[in-house]
Image (spheres, rainbow, N blue to C red):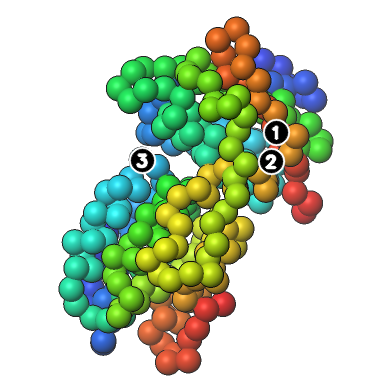
Amino acid sequence: MNLVSENMQDALLVTTEDTRIDAAVAIRFKDQMRAITDDGPKRVVLDLQNVQFVDSSGLGAIVAAMKQVGSGRRLELAGLTSSVKKVFALTRMDSVFTIHGSVEDAFGHTTAKAS
Amino acid sequence: MLMHEEGPNTVIDLALKNDSLAVRTVLEDLNTQLGTLGFLEDTVQNVELVMAEVLNNVVEHAYPEGEEGDIEISAIPSGEGIQFLVQDKGVPMPNGTPPSGEQGSLDCELDDLPEGGFGWFLIRIMAQNLEYRRSDGYNRLSFFMAQEAA
């Protein structure tokens, strides 16, 4: 599991380099997210544009990552590919997360919101 | 991993061990084969998701951790979709029936959001004619995945 983090303005951008967040890596994803987001900016944007597939374990790990970030801060998502978007829509998790079309959208416009 | 016959009676047979990385490999094979048969991306994505959930359930629940087990998949594609049969020799499903897959409420505090239980929910809303049988020491789960319209 490869997560790369970068400080952006007042936010932390975390990019997933892996193409899958599935049962094989869900626990590692969750643990690495905990380490990366342990402290730092209130806003964390998780870039999922490289991720072609998320299963229920991966979805659970992303939800867990949002909980770890905590209620005083927030985890937002960006760059969902078609299959990943489908999983979020079917489970209605797209109503729980703020989802940006792309990283550019997440940082380019202050009015960016869930789509 | 062999196509026995070409044409309308093509059967895809795949086998794997109960391991989450083996699940990845077999999903990749299945994607390639369904793509070759002309199934559209939307259908292939649905199959990948449902099959991932079915296989991960076998890996996590049917076989005790650390014990090697076999999983067999057979798929019969048709113009309407694909009929699947997944078999394993693990422990039977509790109560002899697959979980109902009801999803927890999302109208709650952050800390109470569900982190699991999505698997059977996804299988049940995407797969049709889901049937589970326990016979001859095998768990046999069959279901149909409809071809999505272009």
Task: Residue B86: give x, y in percent of width and height.
Answer: 59, 24
Callout 3 secondary element: loop
Front residue of B114 and B80: B114
Looking at the rendered structure, the secondary structure element under dot 2 is loop
Amino acid carrying label 2: it is: Ala
* Above or below: residue B112 compared with residue B21: below
Q: What's the distance in space between the residues labelled 1 and 3, CA to CA?
A: 26 Å
Q: Which mark is residue B130?
A: 1
Residue found at x 56% / y 77%: A115
In the displayed structure image, the side of residue A41 where residue B57 appears, left or right: right
Q: Which mark is residue A24?
A: 3
Of the residues shown, which amino acid type is indicated by label 3?
Ala
The numbered mark at residue A57 is none
> What residue appears at the point 26 percent right and 86 percent down from the top-left corner?
A10
Crowd rating for badge 3 (residues with CA inside 10 Å; few <14, some 14–19, many 20+): some
Rendering coords of residue B124 (x, y %) = 65, 43
Q: Are marks 2 and 3 on the same chain?
A: no
Q: Position of residue B61 (x, y in %)?
A: 44, 29
Tell me which amino acid carries mark 1: Leu
**How many dots with numbers?**
3
Q: Which image quadrant for residue B69?
A: top left
**Residue at mark 2 to residue at mark 3: CA–CA distance:** 23 Å
The image's mark for residue B127 is 2
Determine whether, in the image, residue B87 is placed left or right of residue B114.
Answer: right
Q: Above or below — where is A79 with respect to A26?
A: below
In front of the other: B129 or A76: B129
- Tag 1, which secondary structure? strand
- For marks 1 and 2, give the CA distance: 7 Å
Q: Is residue A15 visible?
A: no
